[in-house]
Image: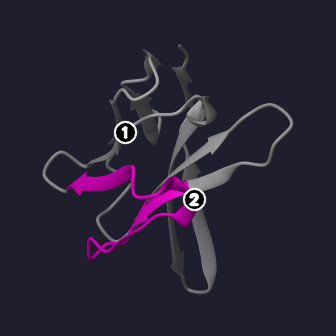
């Protein structure tokens, strides 16, 4: 029923790894761009990784290459592999899907999932 559903969150120690999954419904077709965002209290939601329909990826420099996004067309899913996690990575993580069509933005968000990094 939900367009995007995240899973795989939890609590890890600094330096640990975690892999988030996002299951997309059939309304999300392969021509959508996919992305992961995160948000902490009192802070704007920020993009941490994005992947195009052609599987090109991008991630902000401040993450120092620690996050990797991927997608599986057969499973209609997108993933976020997070390595060498830091306490600053603690946030709610959201899956996002979007595309421009006929000059109109189509945009979907998951409900979000908690990631906590603590020592």
Task: State the residue lying farthest toward the left.
Answer: 74
Mark 2 and mark 1: span between their CA atoms?
A: 23 Å
Q: Is residue 16 above or below residue 74?
A: above
Secondary element at image label 2: helix
Q: Position of residue 58 (x, y in %)?
A: 43, 69
The percent coordinates of residue 46 (x first, y second) are 66, 53
Q: Is residue 68 magenta?
A: yes
In this rendering, does residue 81 appear at all?
yes
Q: Residue at x 79, y 48 (%)?
A: 44
Find residue 87 and report its image quarter.
top right
The residue singled out by tag 2 in the image is: 62
Q: Nearer the viewer, residue 2 or 66?
A: 66
Colouring? one colour
Per the rendered image, the range of residues in magenta is: 48-72
Local packing at callout 1 (Cα closer than 10 Å; few below 14, some 14-19, many 20+) is: many
Query: For the point 17% across and 45% down, which residue is it?
Result: 75
Rendering coords of residue 74 (x, y %): 13, 51
Q: Which mark is residue 22?
A: 1
Which-is-in-front pick, marks 2 and 1?
2
83 w.r.t. 17: above or below? below
């Amino acid at each position: 029923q939900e367009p995007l559903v995240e899973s795989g969150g939890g609590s890890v120690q600094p330096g640990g790894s975690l892999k988030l999954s996002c299951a997309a419904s059939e309304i999300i077709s392969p021509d959508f761009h996919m992305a992961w965002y995160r948000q902490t209290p009192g802070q704007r939601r920020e993009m941490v990784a994005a992947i195009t329909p052609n599987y090109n990826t991008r991630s902000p420099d401040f993450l120092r290459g620690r996050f990797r996004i991927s997608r599986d067309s057969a499973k209609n899913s997108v993933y976020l592999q997070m390595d060498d996690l830091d306490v600053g990575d603690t946030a709610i993580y959201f899956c996002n899907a979007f595309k421009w069509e006929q000059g109109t933005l189509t945009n979907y968000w998951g409900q979000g999932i908690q990631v906590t990094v603590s020592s």
